[in-house]
Every structure is written in structure tokens, then in C-alpha cells.
Amino acid sequence: MSRRADTVRFRYNQAILVAALVAVIGALPLATARWWLLWVLLIPLAVAVWAWRAGTDADARELRLRALVGQRRVPWTRVAELAADPRGRAVARLDNGETLMLPAVRADDLPRLVSATGQELPESAG
């Protein structure tokens, strides 16, 4: 399954991935000291996988909200509004009133997200 060229991808800063890999290296001495401490490696590994995978993909058909172990697909026909919350994160309000936070999408990214639909934003007044 290949990703289409017109898909817009939003991901968290990859510095999180680097920090998680440094944490894995730092946890190695503790984890290898006793066999029952190996679980300590799972925490930075889970953060590394989340940093690599989590985010939002958008194309002309749908939004895909990706998390550590799953994803949710939302067709554009269900999205009633795109907005920003007070902290500057992007949210989508669905036609049933549900509000979804869009992972890795900031308020400044909303025009690029809308462009993934194939539509254009109206000119702003002033």
C-alpha cells in the first residue's frame, strides 16, 4: 500500500525520537544489572515508537489520526469545523458534536491541512 503524493503529513518533532534513543542507551546499564529490570527499556522504546508513528495524515478523502498502537479514519464529510483550542492545537469538530484533537497539528498548520482537501481558504479581510 503506497502513500499518495497528495497526502499531507503532520508529525511531532523528531527530537523526541532522538531523546528516546538516548534514554534507551542510558537505561541499558540499569536494565542489564538484573533480568527483572529489563522492563525499564520498554518505556523509552514506547516513546520512540510513538514519536516515529503518531501524527495526522490528510488527503482529499479523509483524516487519519495516528497514535502509538492504532489509528482513526475520519472522512471529510463528517468534519463540520476545523479550529484551534486556547493552547494553539488544532481540533476537528464532527457533525455529531464530537471534538477530536489532531495530533501534531498546530493552529498555524490549519491552512496546509485545508489545502489537503483540494479546497482553498477564502481571502482574509484586511
Image (spheres, rainbow, N blue to C red):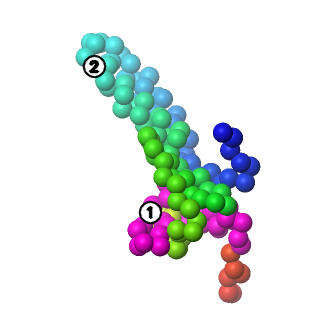
**Secondary structure of the residue carrying numbered label 1:** strand
Coordinates of residue 108 in the picture (x, y in percent)? 59, 65
Relative side of 17 to 26, left or right: right
- Does dot 2 land on a helix, a strand or a loop? helix
Residue hosting label 2: 37
Q: Amino acid at mark 2?
A: Leu
Residue 110, compared with residue 13, is above or below; it is below
The disc labelled 1 sits on which kind of residue? Leu
Residue drawn at (62%, 56%), measured in percent from left and top?
58
**Residue 71 location in percent, x, y?**
48, 48
Q: Is residue 52 above or below residue 28?
A: below
Whichever of callouts 2 and 1 sits on the residue coming sooner in the sequence is: 2
Can residue 88 be seen here? The reply is: no
For the magenta stretch, what is the residue range? 91-120
Q: Is residue 21 visible?
A: yes
Q: Is residue 39 left or right of residue 73?
A: left
Give residue 11's position: percent from left, percent from top: 56, 48
